[in-house]
Amino acid sequence: MATKFPRSSAWALYFVSMVVLTPPRYCSSVRIVPPAVFVFGGTLVDAGTNAFLPYSTAIAANFPFYGIDFFDSVPHGRFSNGRVVADEVARRIGFEMSPPSFLSLVAGGYPSYKFNRTITSRGVNFASAFSGILSSTGRAYGQVVPYPEQVRQFSTSVAGNLTAVLGQPGSANFIRQSFFLFSVGVGDTVEYIQNLTAGRPYYRSDDLFLDALISQFVGGLLVT
């Protein structure tokens, strides 16, 4: 008899696993590196987004001793002493590390040609620590970029620029061949369980909470 996957707050913990969307990139013994990596999610894969948010000082990692074991021993906004999961995933598929955060490119005042070159050669990391699939997640700690906003940044600023540079067929092909990494649901699950334990459930049942997560997540996939 097939095991039925339990739908409960315990099951919600399974939702934190990473989702990788990428076409088959291997042919016999030859590994083909995708043209770019696009990262969405929260703390585990944030490559510096929160360091560029004006009201996220309580949930930023741009001060010592974050980054002490990074290549230059300087904090780069990652919630780690060195690399984060996104860096390791990117390295294993052929890149030096995770691409730069979207906000670092915007705040850095990159001219359009440099912004586009970064997108087409490396990709972009949209992840924001403490954020979640739900827009409300993490707001109690400060400013974050939730998953729906990350998707909007991709669809408006990145996909639009790719179309302008590569044309519609070229942009579609580039996105189709790129590597997409989603690490989502951690913040939502933790916050939900915290509120549940404190007697402040904001969903009538675990099933409704999980349905909301899945619906919001799949909706973002349809946009990307």
Image (spheres, helix red, strand yellow):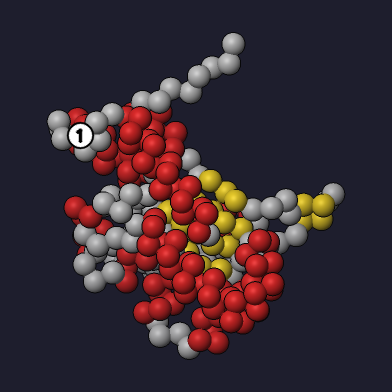
Q: Residue furthest right?
A: 28
Q: Residue furthest top?
A: 1
Instruction: Pick whichever, 86 or 10, lies toward us.
Output: 10
Residue 159 picture location, percent across and down: 54, 71
Q: Position of 84 compared to 62: left or right?
A: right
Please name the residue shown 56% across and 74% down the image: 119
Instruction: Pick whichever, 166 or 145, lies toward us.
Output: 166
The residue tagged 1 is 201
Please name the residue shown 20% across and 34% down the image: 201
Residue 217 picture location, percent across and down: 44, 48
Residue 207 versus residue 100 in the image, above or below: above
Can residue 176 be seen here? The reply is yes
Q: Residue furthest left?
A: 199
Q: Residues within 10 Å of mark 1 (few under 14, many from 20)?
A: some
Q: Position of 203 compared to 34: left or right?
A: left
Residue 206 versus residue 224 in the image, above or below: above
Q: How many marks?
A: 1
Can residue 82 be seen here? The reply is no
Please name the residue shown 53% across and 84% down the image: 114
- Look at label 1 and name its amino acid: Pro
Instruction: Pick whichever, 222 or 22, lies toward us.
Output: 222
Q: Position of 178 compared to 45: left or right?
A: right
Residue 113 picture location, percent across and down: 55, 87
Please name the residue shown 41% across and 62% down the image: 150
Element under label 1?
A: loop
Instruction: Pick whichever, 52 or 201, lies toward us.
Output: 201
Residue 145 picture location, percent across and down: 33, 61
